[in-house]
Image (cartoon, helix red, strand yellow):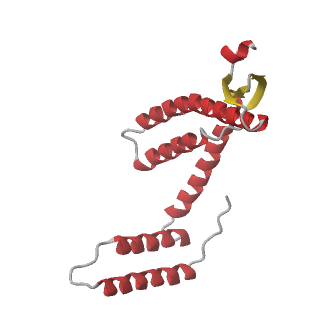
């Protein structure tokens, strides 16, 4: 049995995992199961790092302006979501013995962190673009947001006392129809993501 099954040697800057699966139907199915399990182990290692970073950033935002705090939370949430998207996982070795298959996988943590940082920067740039558009209260996007917010407030309010369900439903349909007509007249810029 290779040494890496019990004690994998991991180069600096890499994270590694070893997992196994029983070969029942096919070797490829067992390899897929072992690989998936090993990737989950890698994700768990990375999740600890990301959650630590997220907690630190959120504590730094205490007392800051609301918009700045929201942007930090947005960035943290993007990083948390990215923790399950592991690109660049490589299978270093495989071993089969007695109807059991082991896989040894690793990932370059520095390269992964750089890809995540690029994604965070892209998301931050998109967020800034959208926030800039909404800062102009006369922009079509700001008017659409206000209209939608007003309609949502009306539609989510409880039925007024003394109204019948039929009257309440008819009024809600009128609000939605008016919103759709208003939005149809507003010229929105196409989203280029």
Q: Measuring 65% from the left and 33% from the top, which residue is drawn there? A: 39
Query: Going by the image, does 8 lie left or right of 45?
Result: right
How many marks can you see? 0
Depth order, front residue of 173/8: 8
Depth order, front residue of 154/19: 19
Q: Is residue 103 above or below residue 193?
A: above
Q: Is residue 118 above or below residue 145?
A: above
For the N terminus, which image quadrant?
A: top right
x%, y% of residue 51?
Answer: 50, 33
Depth order, front residue of 7/146: 7
For the C terminus, which image quadrant?
A: bottom right
Q: Measuring 61% from the left and 49% from the top, which residue is drawn there? A: 123
Q: Residue furthest left?
A: 162
x%, y% of residue 57?
Answer: 47, 35
Q: Quarter-wise, where is residue 44 in the image?
A: top right
Q: Measuring 63% from the left and 69% from the top, which residue is drawn there? A: 189
Is residue 152 something that shows in the picture? yes
Q: Is residue 176 above or below residue 8?
A: below
Q: Measuring 53% from the left and 78% from the top, which residue is drawn there? A: 183
Is residue 88 something that shows in the picture? no
Q: Is residue 160 above or below residue 53?
A: below
Query: Going by the image, does 108 lie left or right of 78?
Result: right
Query: Going by the image, does 89 lie left or right of 58?
Result: right
x%, y% of residue 106?
Answer: 71, 26
Q: Quarter-wise, where is residue 79 in the image?
A: top right
x%, y% of residue 89?
Answer: 72, 33
Q: Quarter-wise, where is residue 50 in the image?
A: top right
């Amino acid at each position: 049995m290779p040494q890496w099954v019990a004690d994998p040697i991991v180069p600096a800057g890499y994270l590694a995992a070893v997992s196994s699966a029983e070969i029942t139907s096919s070797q490829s199915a067992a390899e897929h199961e072992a690989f998936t399990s090993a990737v989950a182990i890698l994700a768990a290692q990375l999740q600890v790092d990301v959650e630590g970073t997220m907690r630190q950033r959120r504590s730094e935002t205490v007392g800051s302006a609301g918009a700045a705090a929201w942007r930090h939370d947005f960035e943290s949430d993007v990083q948390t979501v990215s923790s399950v998207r592991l690109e660049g996982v490589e299978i270093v070795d495989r071993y089969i013995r007695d109807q059991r298959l082991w896989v040894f996988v690793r990932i370059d943590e520095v390269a992964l962190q750089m890809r995540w940082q690029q994604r965070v920067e892209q998301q931050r740039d998109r967020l800034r673009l959208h926030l800039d558009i909404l800062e102009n209260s006369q922009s079509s996007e700001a008017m659409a947001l206000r209209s939608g917010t007003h309609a949502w407030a009306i539609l989510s309010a409880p039925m007024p006392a003394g109204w019948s369900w039929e009257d309440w439903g008819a009024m809600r349909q009128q609000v939605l129809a008016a919103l759709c007509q208003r939005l149809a007249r507003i010229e929105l810029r196409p989203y280029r993501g």
